[in-house]
Image (tube, rainbow, N blue to C red):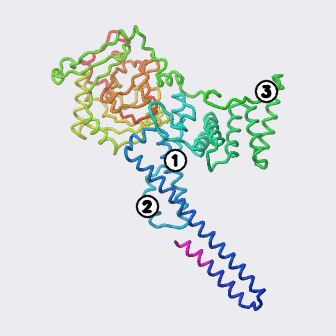
Amino acid sequence: MRKSLSYISLVLLCCSSWITHAEVFTSIGQMTDLLYTEKELVQSLREYIKAEETKLASVKSWANKLDALTRVSTTDPEGYLAHPVNAYKLMKRLNTEWNELESLVLQNPSDGFISNMSVHRQYFPDEEDETGAAKALMRLQDTYQLDSEAFSKGKLPGMQSDAFLTVDDCFDMGKTAYNDADYYHAVLWMQQSLKQLDAGEEAATTKAEILDYLSYSVYQMGDLPRAIELTRRLVAIDPSHQRAGGNLRYFEKLLFKQLNELNQAYQPASEEPIQLGTYNRPKDHLPERETYEALCRGEGIKLTEAKRSRLFCRYQDGFRNPRLLLKPMKEEDEWDSPHIVRYLDVLSSEEIDKIKELAKPRLARATVRDPKTGVLTTAQYRVSKSAWLEGEDDPVIARVNQRIEDITGLTVDTAELLQVANYGVGGQYEPHYDFSRRPFDSNLKVDGNRLATFLNYMSDVTAGGATVFPDFGAAIWPRKGTAVFWYNLFKSGEGDYRTRHAACPVLVGSKWVSNKWIHERGQEFRRPCGLTEVD
């Protein structure tokens, strides 16, 4: 209110000075000027009132929209955030749009609101979080071959939702990619932003702004004819644009130079709209990228009928373990070589809830060991949050550890703690080995290498989130309460390089897993050495 009062005081002060000055006028003619002055003051006052009403209307509109939104989102928080568009928009809202609302309210300060903002700001996502959420959508877009419109309209496999991206949202997605020199995704999202704007959707972003980013990104993708066509559209809209004219001359000069060198005639830009597949996605560090992503989509799985005929299901009593004799585990073969099995009904819903309850306060960004330095660090190829639980934390953890030992017949005395991981929007772990390759890290010299992996699935996943093995073309889908098990090492202690695997990005849903990495020491008589290196 302080600014409002100061504005009124200023108006009254002006009135006072003008009236004082007017007192020297004695003619009607001179006094008529005061009428026009008063009229101007009234108009000024109305503009002030209108500005306040507009501001209040904007705040009310925000409140109504967010009230409706939070009623829906808090009814089922995890289900709401299972949709990656909702997760991205939450990041964007709290990092960008709430700041805009704060600036609006600051025009007429409200101590209570600002105090609440200050208290809660420490928990808000920052710029890095918003950027990470945007990149997660792009990662999903690539892995599952979804065009930008599918995300913009909320059309994702296995989910019907009214989540959508506006022109401004798509523009911000494009800018995120552009600022990261990722022109491939910048083109896709700027094109979608332009498409929605041309369809009549209202937006704060202008067509000139979109064309500016889009034309240069298309140029970076090597499509000079289309870059020229887009830049000409930009010049037509904004002839005084500071870069457009220079860019157009440069693009045209570059194109005609290329045509002369190749002795080709000029071909106008394609009239086909830019879409997924118009440009080739740049190669990256991962050699098996295409195979890995195809498996994530359920394509390229090499489970032939001959191989399927070698897969069986059975009851497993843990080699006559007393705790499993009366209630043996149901075991299903997922793959024959390397042998991967799935156990059913490993964890109850109550046990899963307790594990998640214990893990949630400890969840932190999952790390990997830098192969050069040996130091644990975060990495873009592993996007999840994890926590480590000890048997002493709760009887449930001790019981689960014992169950893993009973099922596998391997001691867990030298195993790592139970690791709990949660994969949210775009969460993934790209192809990797669970075992360490020589020279071993210092932490493996006592307990040995990671002999085996026991992976519990603690949630169903609506779409995505498979565990895939690119080397032999297997895909294992999460099923709540089940667990999969495989050996990472041959009996000789050599690493089985076929077990290179990945956790596919979660497209829709929230993926919870817990895993136990079982080490070599203590297994000498439980899994004796073989006669050859690959037994």
x%, y% of residue 431?
Answer: 46, 26
Place of residue 85 in the rendered image (x, y in percent of width and height, measured from the top left)? 49, 40
Identify the element where label 1 is drawn.
Answer: helix
Residue drawn 70% across and 43% down?
212
Q: Amino acid at mark 2?
A: Asn
Residue 267's disc number = 3
First of labels 3, 2 by sequence position: 2
State which quarter of the image contains the C terminus: top left
The prevailing secondary structure element of the residues shown in magenta is helix
Residue picked out by circle 1: 92
Residue 22 drawn in magenta = no
| Secondary element type, mark 3 | loop
Residue 8 falls inside the magenta stretch: yes
Residue type, mark 3 in image: Gln
Three-letter amino acid code at disc 1?
Lys
The residue under the point 56% across, 63% down is 55
Query: Disc 3 to disc 2, how far (Cα)?
Result: 59 Å
**Where residue 485 sits: x, y (%)?**
33, 22
Kindly report the distance in space between the C-alpha atoms of the residues bearing marks 1 and 2.
Answer: 19 Å
Identify the residue at image location x=23%, y=17%: 315
Q: Mark 3 packing: few (<14 Cα in 10 Å), some, or many (20+)? A: few
Mark 2 Cα within 10 Å, few/some/many (few <14, many 20+)? Answer: few
Q: Say which quarter of the image contains residue 188.
A: top right
Residue range highlighted in magenta? 1-10
The earlier-in-sequence mark between 1 and 3 is 1
Q: Which residue is mark 2?
A: 116
Label 1 crowd (10 A; few <14 / some 14-19 / many >=20): many
Q: Of helix, strand and loop, which one carries label 2?
A: helix
